[in-house]
Image (spheres, grey):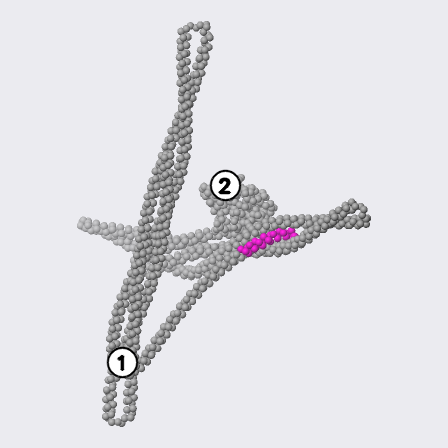
Amino acid sequence: MTLHATRAAALLSWVNSLHVASPVETVLQLQDCSVFIKIIDSIHGTEEGQQILQQPVPERLEFVCSFLQKNRKHPSSPECLVSIQKVIEGSELELAKMTMLLLYHSTMSSKSPRDWEQFEYKIQAELAVILKFVLDHEDGLNLNEDLENFLQKAPVPSTCSSTISEELSPPSHQAKREVRFLELQKVASSSGNNFLSGSPVSPMGDILQTPQFQMRRLKKQLADERNNRDELELELAENRKLLTEKDAQIAVMQQRIDRLALLNEKQAASPLEPRELEELRGKNESLTVRLHETLKQCQDLKTEKSQMDRKINQLSEENGDLSFKLREFASHLQQLQGALNDLTEEHSKATREWVEKQAQLEKELSTAVQDKKCLEEKNEILQGKLSHLEEHLAQMRENPTREKGEVLGDVLQLETLKQEAASLAADNSQLQARVEALEAEQGQREAKLLAERGHFEEEKQQLAGLIAELQGSLSNLSQAKEELEQASQAQGARLSAQVATLTSELTTLNATLQQQDQELASLKQQAKQEQAQLAETLQQQEQASQGLRQQLEQLSSSLKQKEQQLEEAAQEQEAARRDHAQRLAAAAEERQSSLKERDSALQQLEALEKEKTARLEVLQQQLQTANEARDSAQASVTRAQREKAELSQKVEELHACVEAARQEQCEAQAQVAELKAQLRSEQQKATERERVAQEKGQFQEQVRALEESLKISKGSLEEEKRRASDALEEHQRHIAKLEAETRCLVEQHKQERKELEEERAGRKGLEARLRQLGEAHQTEMEALRRELAEAVASQREAEGECEQLAKEVATWRERYEDSQQEEAQYGAMFQEQLMTLKEECEKARQELQEAKEKVAGIEAHSELQISRQQNEVAQLRANLARALQQAQEKEVRAQKLADDLSVLQEKMAATGKEVVRLEALVRKAGEQQETASRELLKEPPRPGDRGSEWPEEQQGRQFCSTQAALQAMEREAEQMGSELERLRAALIESQSQQREERGQQEREVARLTQERSRAQADLALEKAAKAELEMRLQNALNEQRVEFATLQEALAHALMEKEGKDQELAKLRGQEAAQKTELGELQQTVQRLKEQLAKREEGRQQSLGPAIGEDSSGSGGAQSESTGKSERKGPELEALRAEVSKLERQCREHQEKASGLERSLECERASRAEQAGALEALQGRLEEKAQELGRSQDTLATAQRELATLRAKAQDHSKAEDEWKTQVARGQQE
């Protein structure tokens, strides 16, 4: 569609009214963007565009597009409003779009009132419509399409500028039938009327006085003020940075002054003072550095806080706009849902009524059809009767002799039958008319139904589209709302965290600032004190300088006195002057040196005084400027804080106004909704009968759409259920796995518990055995005491056996250590072999991979070469075919030329013969003529010779004719010669072309033969490489097989050694069991001996006790006998006890040896278990190696297959090359 003329004319009239350039008549005159840049300069009130006007058109376009994008309501949106390419191509639509947006921005940002009455009413109305459209659709998702549609469509005729066609609005706005109070009411405030331009009668005045426009304008002004505030804050921050830098410079200068003062005071001060001054200087420098850092941090935090406040305000505004839009969409959806519910109810009622009416009509139709059938049957019966009666009447007429009564009866019957027939015919006609009417009604109803169905389907499609668009927009808005809510929540959380951190930092900074203020005050006091000290030092220096001056004056006076004295001495002692000349010269030199020193000292003092005065003045000025800058900065900070407070108050007031306006808008919307509901109810009551069909179709379509949406939602729910079920199944599987793992762990725990219980039971059994052994030992002590001699012998035998056992254990230990060393060596060997096997396998894999890659590369290269050669062969075949065709054509042409040449040669021969004949005739005629002329010259003329002149004339004429014929033949001969030359040249050219083509073909054949030889060489190299790879792979496989065989042999050897060690272990276990039995027997003997000893001691005590009780007063001989016996038995008991202790020690040693043997056995078992695990691991590795060997064999087989296929391809290629060579040879032969 093209650009609408009226809107384009209105925009051009507005552009011309600005008087920024010469008047414009068409939109295409704005393509150079100079007018747009001048309009932007007039909006900004600056002359930034003057530099851009000197640049080319694309850069101007970029400047205008950046201005339009920057001044949008949402500058961060990715949608580009203007296409630069289309503008460069000369699109009127894009230029009109740019002028339309510039009109909106200029009216929105105009600060001075404008006289809109200079335009015509139609132009004002169009401009008002344009402004209203941009104002309404500025928040749209697809503003670019809306602007294009608006500029392409014709405007709806309207008298009021506030009403805009709903066709131009997007789908989200089309469904709105509400009337917003912002669009209809005007602001009654005098300030708004004074501020806004245009008369209240004009459409532009009406549109500019709407609250919507004013709100947008105020928001834009607020945004501009925020931007200005940001710029001012940035400038303030920069100024603060400059101030801090100046403060730092001042501090540096102050430090330099302090250093100079200290340098001046170093001579007069004590040695303790410079240290204190250096400490104070260091503290002062550190404090100043800290102060500058804290000031910078405060400034940075203030700027960040202001930026965060701005971001929070922007986000709150965007959130408010989005919430307002969502509320509008939600209310609209609720209204649509209510309307849909009402329509569904009405549709269900109408369908019920329609079904009832259809059933009644069908019943009436069926009854009518049945009546018709009955009447038709009756009619047929009556017609049969009538025909029968007519036949009977005919018979009666033929036989009139019958009786009259019978005739009258028949006549009466006939009349009655006729009456019945007539009545039946009438009924039949009525029934037919009724049936026809019913069929017509049915046809009409069916047509109406079809029309209604078509209408319903159309409306259904429209409603489905609207519902889909609304649902899409709702989903998009909901998603956007959720995203924005999430983003706002996240940002709110971040901002709250940042605010908390900032508040904490601000508190800390305030505390630090207070401390720094205190430190500043102390520093100021210190500075004052230092200034006082400096003044004192300066005074002291001045005093010292005055003293020096006095000293100099004294010196000068003394010098003068000396000079006077010298002069007097010179006057008095002129003779002595010669003698003291050298002294006087020295004195003069000393005086000159002293004068020079005095002058230099005076100059230094003057320079120092000047420097001090200058430095003091500079420092005082710097201090004054620093104080003034600090005061100005504090004043600017206080002003900024006041302005911020005022702006926050204004913003709060605006927010309150906006909320009040929103509340009023909501109330007005509620009132409008109520009025609309009332109107709808009245309209529905009035137009129920007319809308039944339409609403029915709409409801059907909506119901179908809802059913589809329900199906979709059901599908989505089912998918979610499936996902949930899948997730539950996975969770259950995971739970089952965990349960299985827990069961396994529980079973393992149970098994471990069982093993622990078994071990405990074994321990208990061992403890019981030990107890039993102890009891047996205690019971057998007496027997051992009795059988002491046997025990000693058995002890000796046991000692020998123990020694033998110890030797055997040592030998077994040595064997075990040797076996362990051998096993370690074997393990190391196995590991080394495994590592070598792994490395060789990896090498083989790498070689296989490289071989595969090489084979793939060779295949690709060969395929490429084959494809290239095939293409070249095809090209050569085509070239050969073309060359053959050309050769055949050239042969045909040569044959034709040869035929033509032969014909021409024949013609030339014939013409030559004729020429020779004619020349002979000419010669003969010339000779005859000469002879005749001679005769005539010789003979005088005669009167009778006039008759002979005629034949001479005839001969002359014949001669002339023959000459003309000769000339014609010569011309033809020349033409034939030229044609012959041309044909010869053509033949020569064709022969040269054929030679060139043959040369080219021979060159191509040579090139192809060279390429073929190269390809054969490449194939030979590839075959050699493949053969080498095959040999390498075969060698690697053979080596792996050999290594596998060696590993198997090593495994068998290890298994044999394992079996031998198992046998040795079994022997050791048997020996251990025998030793245990022997230990048990020894322990039993020891127990017996202990028991015997205990019994003997008890018997001795029993025998001694009664003897002492009964014979207390006995004789000394009995006592001496009893003492002798006891003395005899005492050493025997001691010897028995010693032997028992020895036996116990030996038993303990045997037990310790047995426990050591058990431990060694357990160690051997553990090592055997480790060896078994290592052997199992070796077996697993060997199996893996076998699998890898199988895989490598498979890969080798595949590589061999691929090589076979490549060889077959190479053979095919060689065959194709041979065929091609034969064809080339044939072509060359041809």
Q: Which residue is mark 1?
A: 1140
At label 1, the amino acid type is Val
> CB of mark 1 within 8 Å of CB of mark 2?
no
Secondary structure of the residue carrying tag 2 is: loop
In percent of width and height, residue 602 lies at 30, 52
Q: Which residue is mark 2?
A: 90
**Front residue of 649 and 894:** 894
**Front disc: 1 or 2:** 1
Secondary structure of the residue carrying tag 1 is: helix
The residue at 78%/45% (across/down) is: 398
Taking the magenta stretch, the answer to whether it contains residue 275 is no
Quarter of the image containing the C terminus?
A: top left
At label 2, the amino acid type is Gly
Quarter of the image containing the N terminus?
A: top right
**Front residue of 1140 and 566:** 1140
The tag earlier along the polypeptide, 1 or 2, is 2
Taking the magenta stretch, the answer to whether it contains residue 700 is yes
Span shown in magenta: 685-712
**Front residue of 45 and 310:** 310
In percent of width and height, residue 1062 lies at 30, 67
